[in-house]
Amino acid sequence: MKKAVNLKEELALFEEHWSPKIVGEYNGNEVMVVKFKGEYPFHSHADTDDFFLVLEGRMTMELRDRKIEVGPGELFIVPKGVEHRPVAEEEVKVLLIEPKGEPNSGDSTERAPAVKEWI
Amino acid sequence: MKKAVNLKEELALFEEHWSPKIVGEYNGNEVMVVKFKGEYPFHSHADTDDFFLVLEGRMTMELRDRKIEVGPGELFIVPKGVEHRPVAEEEVKVLLIEPKGEPNSGDSTERAPAVKEWI
């Protein structure tokens, strides 16, 4: 990292939804920016927590037994093994952290994992 | 985590500088909010990267060979083993991630580590 990463600038470089872009690495984890719109299938990650920080917009993190509203500047960490799906009526911009190589789709059979690439 | 953590609300609960407050855990790492003002001694963390995301304000991350300006919405991850010190002329509010138990002062002999507590 030669200089600080401006998350808003990185987010302006792409438009696709559900396609995390890597902006940094922290101890073997990929730090990513991603845009969500619509709903993603329920899935879980057996071996890792899943870190979501909303940068702009709003989303609902649906768990099987409750729904968590997550607005700008709000953080929600899904514990490992817990089924979840992000739902966003309007586009939401998110900072996402997952271990390197972890499929963003977890154990979902409905959705193939995105190819996570550096931006 | 019963609901999303609003980082601004958490930051409003304390005033001390250089005293990280834990707001979440991600795979054995502590996710913290912290306020910096002034300068911290140079130090490094032998076994971990050090994650800084500026939420409000500005800081300079000084390395031995260069200075990194980090403004709001900007991320800088100090690689493990790299000497660094955050410097902030005015108060800056930061999201910090370090492994559980890692002293925020790293190998510094000038500064005792802060007691990291949940807020």
Image (tube, coloured by chain):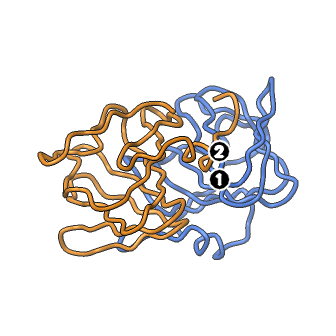
Chain colours: A blue, B orange
Q: Is residue A11 above or below residue A39?
A: below
- Do circles 1 and 2 both sit on a common chain? no
Q: Residues within 10 Å of mark 1 (few under 14, many from 20)?
A: some
Callout 1 secondary element: loop
Which kind of residue does numbered mark 2 sit on? Asn
Task: Give me the residue at 61% from left, 33% from top.
Answer: A45
Residue at (67, 53) in percent of width and height = A54
The answer to whether the residues at label 1 and label 2 have Cβ atoms under 8 Å apart is yes
Q: Looking at the picture, tell me which residue is in the foreground, B12 or B65.
A: B12
Is residue B89 found left or right of A87 in the rendered image?
Answer: left
Amino acid type at mark 1: Gly
Judged from this view, the residue extending furthest toward the front is: B15
Count of labels shown? Answer: 2
For the point 56% across and 34% down, which residue is it?
A49
Q: Quadrant of residue B28?
A: top left
Residue located beneath label 1 in the image: A73
Residue A21 sits in quarter = bottom right
Protein chain holding label 1: A
**Position above or below: B77 against B14:** below
Residue nearer the viewer, A11 or A14? A11
For disc 2, the chain is B
* Residue B7, position as x, y percentages in the image: 59, 47
Write down the residue under mark 2.
B6
Q: CA distance from mark 1 to mark 2?
A: 6 Å
Q: Is residue B87 above or below residue B118?
A: below
Q: Find residue B69 and report its image quarter.
A: bottom left
For numbered disc 2, what is the local secondary structure? strand
